[in-house]
Amino acid sequence: MPLPREDVEATTPKFLRDKYAIAGVGETSYTRGSDKSTRALASIAVRNAIEDAGLKSSEIDGMLSYQFNDSVFSPFVAGDLGIRLNFYMDVFGGGSSTEALIGIAIGVIEAGLCKTVVIFRSMNGFSQVRIGGTGVRSAIPVSGDMMHSRAYGWQSAGQMFAPTFMRHMHDFGTTAEQVAHVRVAHSHHASNNPKAYYKKRMTVEDVVTSRMICKPLHLLDCCVETDNANAIIVTSAERAKDLKHPLVRIRGVVGRCCKPRADMHYQTGPISTVAGHYARDLLWPNSGVSPEDVDLTGSYDAFTFTTMLQLEDYGFCKKGEGGHYVSDGTIMLGGKRPNNTSGGHLCEGYTHGIAMVIENVRQLRHDADDSCPIGPDGKRQHTYDYREGGCRQVKNAEVSANLGWASPGTGSAMVMRRG
Amino acid sequence: MISAEYLGMPLEINDLDHENLSYFAYCAKHEFRLQRCAACKLLRYPPTTACPWCSEVNSEWVPVEGRGTVHSYTEVHHAIQPAFRPFTPYLVLLVELDTQSGVPTKEEGLRVAGNLVRPDGVLAPKADVERVGIGSRVRMVFTDIASGLALPQWTIDETAAGGTPWRYRE
């Protein structure tokens, strides 16, 4: 593919561009009530990723995972699947961890610690530790830094991020209706994704008339809570090129890039700006591409607003024009640059970001798992008819960007390309 | 160690958390104090272990005026903690203090969190909640929780000249 601007100055040595690849992806179903332990879910997802890559368990020798004290650790999953590890690490974290761990996987393979790394996130985000903060999470004592937040009933992700969202509306005139288009787009995409938990198509009216959770977030501005596990396999492109699927190469990664004062980022403004404002200065030079080169995005949708804010701060539109960008058809399937073609966290299921990377890997393989018929060659015959229940493959997808979100103050990102 | 209960939530400040122990000990006396860096003399919020501008670890607690302007907010209709439910909708305010506003750079300020409360420290009724938005002038009051512990909070500054605050449109 004609990948441009090899001359762009890179923060990391350019020879790492394209040197590593995503060789396999896999997941469980998205449910509310998995009736399985996070250990069992992780085993299923990791096994599915290994099979997807066409590897044997014995060919995996590295493992990474992330969690919030709500999941199984790597050695148990590796042991269950008969994988002997040369390297593993389980880190604390939620959204934006996926891209950061892919960067770590590249680093440890490059350093010779192992050759092929599987990354997983396994969670019973509905039936055990609810991501929205109700149940177990609301019962733990308020201490330390939380004395300045939870003590005020300022606890859930939506409540914590809302001052950023509100200030964006104040500063730039962004409207609830504009941002509701993110839910509309993702719900349309989910209607063509047989795996999605919520498949129903929604309208702007549905979103802005749903009940208020915390201003400016209506119920339908917020993502779903689900039980699921997902896994990704990272290895060298040299190794991946002989495996089952078309090669999906990693162009560049940014891991957990922060605004100043990430502990209390509201101290430094403008608070309507998010970590992507800083991350973009690593992402685009490292990847050697610009937003204009990107065919589809995976901007994290914990909330409709997080998608909009990141697309804006990574430079897909001018500062302040995010509301327009997400509502003018650009991010819909069939538009110029679709976002979260799986339906994302708003509709498909909640995975702390890993499923958005998986979706883009499948898109770049030109193998989105929609309802299009399988041809005689065993490959899906995509129709590019995006009507409900139809195709969700982006035509000629060559370059994708994932924009992971932990909070307004912290984010990660990754550019991948086909071939 | 301070241990108390507030609106159904256990609150704990452990013996090694000297920064928060000091901060809340002043609050219990209805005094608002912040750490002032021993080197660069800038104030900081919330309590931390070093200066975010010059990395100096030493500081002193100095009195700061509890007045400011609402910089942003959220109005919570669906409470997570059950004991907040009778008070919905309640406001979480991010208030930029008049002190050190726009210092050391234009976009920085001391932005202090708190709820909108009545002057006696109880969460404000709906009629007051609906009067407050970005730009509202507020003053600090305290919610007494237990002996030795009070939370800094915000109440409408009725003495302030009132422009119309910016509020999220229904």
Image (spheres, coloured by chain):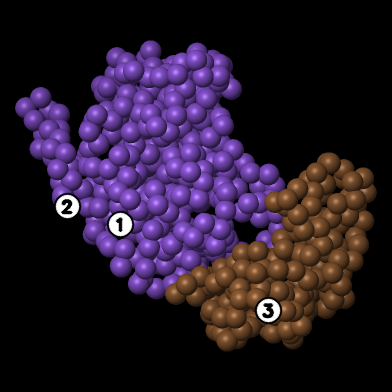
Chain colours: A purple, B brown
Amino acid carrying mark 3 in the image: Gly
Q: Which residue is mark 3?
A: B162
Amino acid carrying mark 1 in the image: Val
SS of the residue under disc 1 = helix
Residue A220 spot, x, y in % from top left: 37, 64
Question: Could you tell me which quadrant the N terminus of chain A lies in?
Answer: top left
Which residue is depicted at the point 34% across and 56% down? A181
Amino acid carrying mark 2 in the image: Glu
- Check the image and report above or below for A64 versus B144: above
- Check the image and report above or below for B73 versus B164: above
SS of the residue under disc 3 = loop
Q: Nearer the viewer, mark 1 or mark 3?
A: 3
Chain of the residue that carries numbered disc 1 in the rendered image: A
Circle 3 Cα neighbour tier, 10 Å, few/some/many (<14 / 14–19 / ≥20): few
A161 or A145: which is nearer to us? A161
Mark number for residue A388? 2
Q: What distance separates the C-alpha of mark 2 from that of mark 3?
A: 52 Å
Q: Which residue is mark 1?
A: A184
Which image quadrant is residue A392 in? top left
Please state if B130 lies on the left or on the right of A187 as rendered.
right
Question: Could you tell me which quadrant the C terminus of chain A lies in?
Answer: top left
Residue A272 spot, x, y in % from top left: 57, 53
Proximity of marks 1 and 3: CB atoms separated by less than 8 Å:
no
Please state if A29 lies on the left or on the right of A66 as rendered.
left
**Are tags 1 and 3 found on a single chain?**
no
Which residue is depicted at the point 84% across and 41% down? B54
